[in-house]
Image (cartoon, rainbow, N blue to C red):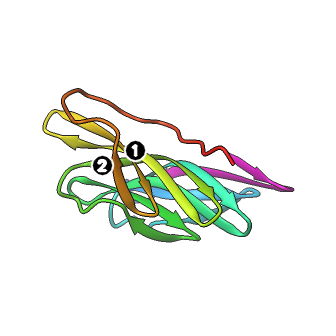
Amino acid sequence: IYVAGNDVYVAGNHLNNDNKTLAVYWKNNVLVNLTDGSHDAVTKSIFVAGSDVYIAGYISLGPAVAVYWKNGVGIKLTDGTNSAFATSIYVSGNDVYVVGYEYSGNNSIAKYWKNGNAVNLTDGNTYVQTTSIFIRP
């Protein structure tokens, strides 16, 4: 959930009639679809900067692909070689930070992306997940 002024934003998901999970958010109780239901998609975090709405999550395209949406437009953070998940998003000035993890065999690599560029936080020798990010202004 994110509150900006008098506006309340909530990231979430819902099932369509074909049992596909759609990535969505609500602004002041009005539903906004981020995906069309052709693939399962999940949201995990929402951030609002001015009039821009940013949401982190993933789309299942075979392996899950880490993605964030800016004003409804999806931006892939990974190429789908390994399953990856974006779990939290924060915007500071012109920089977009997304935290998440990507599988490497049976383990996962904790990472963050700054403006789409990945930075590994672990080496993949253990199973690690990251869940939140905050940038001190």
Q: Residue at x 13, y 38 (%)?
A: 105
Element marked by disc 1:
strand
Seen in the picture, residue 50 relative to 56 is either above or below; the reply is below
Where is residue 3? Give x, y as percent.
Answer: 76, 50
Circle 2 Cα neighbour tier, 10 Å, few/some/many (<14 / 14–19 / ≥20)? many
Where is residue 127? Give x, y as percent.
Answer: 26, 28
Q: Earlier in the sequence, mark 2 or mark 1?
A: 2
Quarter residue 28 falls in: bottom right
Image mark for residue 100? 1
Residue 125, visible in the rendered structure: yes
Between 128 and 57, the one lying in front of the other is: 128
Judged left or right of residue 129, residue 6 is: right
Seen in the picture, residue 114 relative to 125 is either above or below; the reply is below
Q: Main secondary structure of the magenta part?
A: strand
The three-letter code of the residue at mark 2 reads: Ala
Seen in the picture, residue 74 relative to 67 is either above or below; the reply is below
**Residue behind mark 2:** 84
Q: Residue at x 42, y 35 (%)?
A: 130
Image mark for residue 6? none
Between 10 and 68, the one lying in front of the other is: 68
Q: Are marks 2 and 1 in contact (CB under 8 Å)?
A: yes
The boundaries of the magenta stretch are 1-14
Circle 1 Cα neighbour tier, 10 Å, few/some/many (<14 / 14–19 / ≥20)? many
Q: Please, which residue is most extreme toward the right here?
A: 6
Seen in the picture, residue 26 relative to 71 is either above or below; the reply is above
The three-letter code of the residue at mark 1 reads: Gly
Where is residue 12? Give x, y as percent.
Answer: 55, 49
Quarter residue 5 falls in: bottom right
Question: Spatial distance from mark 2 to mark 1, Cα to Cα?
Answer: 7 Å
Q: Quadrant of the N terminus?
A: top right
